Image (spheres, helix red, strand yellow):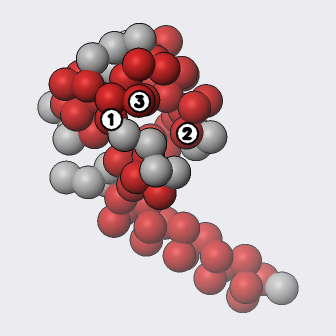
Amino acid sequence: MVTVMSMVRKAMNVTQIDLANEVGITQAEISMIERGKVSPKEETLDKIAHLLATPKDELLLPYTEWLEAQFLAERNRTILK
């Protein structure tokens, strides 16, 4: 599963190692979080959200699900104009 966190990190040209160092965890932990294998502590998620400038409730969503939600929200905004 590709998460929003992974896609945002890559779009910002940030490596897992760089993100891990900034957050204070290991690269392996970042990898497991991005693959949905572990749930991070709330404090860790807060740090990641801040560093990636992404709402923490979106970080762990599957990217395709998030993308679909963004598309539908934009379509609804367009229709309501």
Query: Which residue is under mark 3?
Result: 18
Query: Mark 1 or 2, which is nearer the eye?
Result: 1
Q: Residue at x 72, y 77 (%)?
A: 77
Residue count near mark 2 (Cα–Cα under 10 Å), binned few <14, some 14–19, many ≥20: some
Three-letter code, disc 2? Leu
> Depth check: 54 or 13 in front?
13
23 left or right, relative to 16: right
Task: Classify 61 as above or below 68.
Answer: above
Q: Which mark is residue 16?
A: 1
Secondary structure state at the residue bearing disc 3: helix
72 left or right, relative to 75: left
Q: Between marks 3 and 2, how big is the CA–CA gap?
A: 12 Å
* Residue 31, quarter of picture: top left
Task: Classify 10 as above or below 57.
Answer: below
Three-letter code, disc 1? Gln
Q: Residue at x 44, y 67 (%)?
A: 67
Q: Between marks 1 and 3, how big is the CA–CA gap?
A: 6 Å
Task: Classify 57 as above or below 7.
Answer: above
Residue 35 image position (x, y, % from top left): 20, 41
Question: Which circle's residue, 3 or 2, is located before the other in the chain?
Answer: 3
Total numbered badges shown on the rendered structure? 3
Residue 49 image position (x, y, % from top left): 54, 32
Question: Which circle's residue, 1 or 2, is located before the other in the chain?
Answer: 1
Residue 19 image position (x, y, % from top left): 42, 29
49 left or right, relative to 15: right
Residue 13 image position (x, y, % from top left): 46, 50
Query: Which residue is under mark 2?
Result: 52
Q: Between marks 1 and 2, how big is the CA–CA gap?
A: 12 Å
Secondary structure state at the residue bearing disc 1: helix
